[in-house]
Amino acid sequence: MMTKKGRCLTLLLALGLTLGGCASSSKEEKAMQNSPQKSFEQAQTALTQGNYKKATELLEGLDSRYPFGPYSHQVQLDMMYAYYKQGDYASAISTIDRFTKLNPQHTDLDYAYYMRGLNHMAMDSNFFQELLWVDRTDKDPSSSRQAFEDFANLIKRFPNSKYAADASQRMVFLKNRLANYELAVARYYVKRKAWVAAANRAQTVVDNYEGTKAQEKALELLVDCYDKLGIDELKAHALAVLKENYPDSALVQ
């Protein structure tokens, strides 16, 4: 049989749990009572202040509770930016792809394509390696290649977009990045005396990355490869192209 003292303790525990539950429910209800407009305004304030974590939490809540609300499109656009600023590139790209698929005629579609390029470009960078001046030339450039395609798609579809000029400048950087990667692979083959493979990679730079700094080095490498292979005709052709385009090259002096 439960003593009087035991019954009192049980009642107190039950009362505590009830009050705790009420407090928890009260918080949830208070959060749910926030209007979409108020939550949206709070998210905008957080973005302005650079508090991207808080902004993301608010925006995700709006996106989850009001997927077709009056702020839904802007919420998703802001989420792209907030994820990007936090370095959560996978979530940003997922949001972008969902937005572009569901809103193929939206007036801010160019921004979505631009943000897709920015996120893929950021995925290829490494702050600590750049800080320590580590050469990243031979790093897999798949993200940079995708970023290049994203920016190219933006310029093709929206040539008059306010993001087109910046995208074009970024494509120049990415083109050099991709050319340097191909050149690094060609040099890798040279070290192993795989002359045919090296020549093929160097030719890729010459054919696909015109105007890059790597092109001159690729032509010089081609001359060397064809010399090692004993293919005089191709060597002479590569040398002629090098002389025409880069008359100051050491190989044509």
Image (cartoon, rainbow, N blue to C red):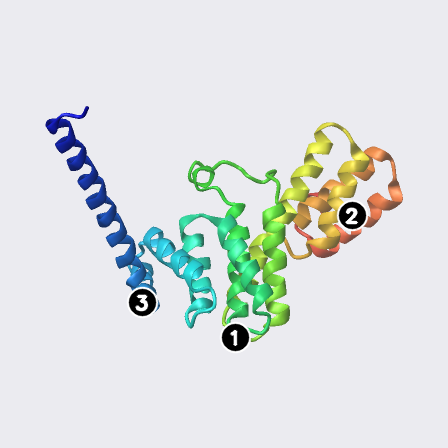
Horizontal and vertical percent for residue 166?
A: 51, 64
Amino acid at pointer 2: Leu
First in sequence: mark 3 or mark 1?
A: 3
Q: Residue at x 44, y 60 (%)?
A: 63
Q: Secondary structure at mark 2?
A: helix
Where residue 239 is drawn, which disc sits there? 2
- Which quadrant holds residue 62? bottom left
Mark 1–mark 2 Cα distance, whole angstroms, equals 51 Å
> Residue under circle 1?
107
**Three-letter code, disc 1:** Thr
Q: Which residue is mark 3?
A: 35
Closest to the camera, between mark 3 and mark 2, is 3
Which disc, if any, is residue 147?
none
Q: Residues within 10 Å of mark 2 (few under 14, many from 20)?
A: many
Seen at 64% across and 43% down, the residue is 181
User: Residue 138 vs residue 2: left or right?
Assistant: right
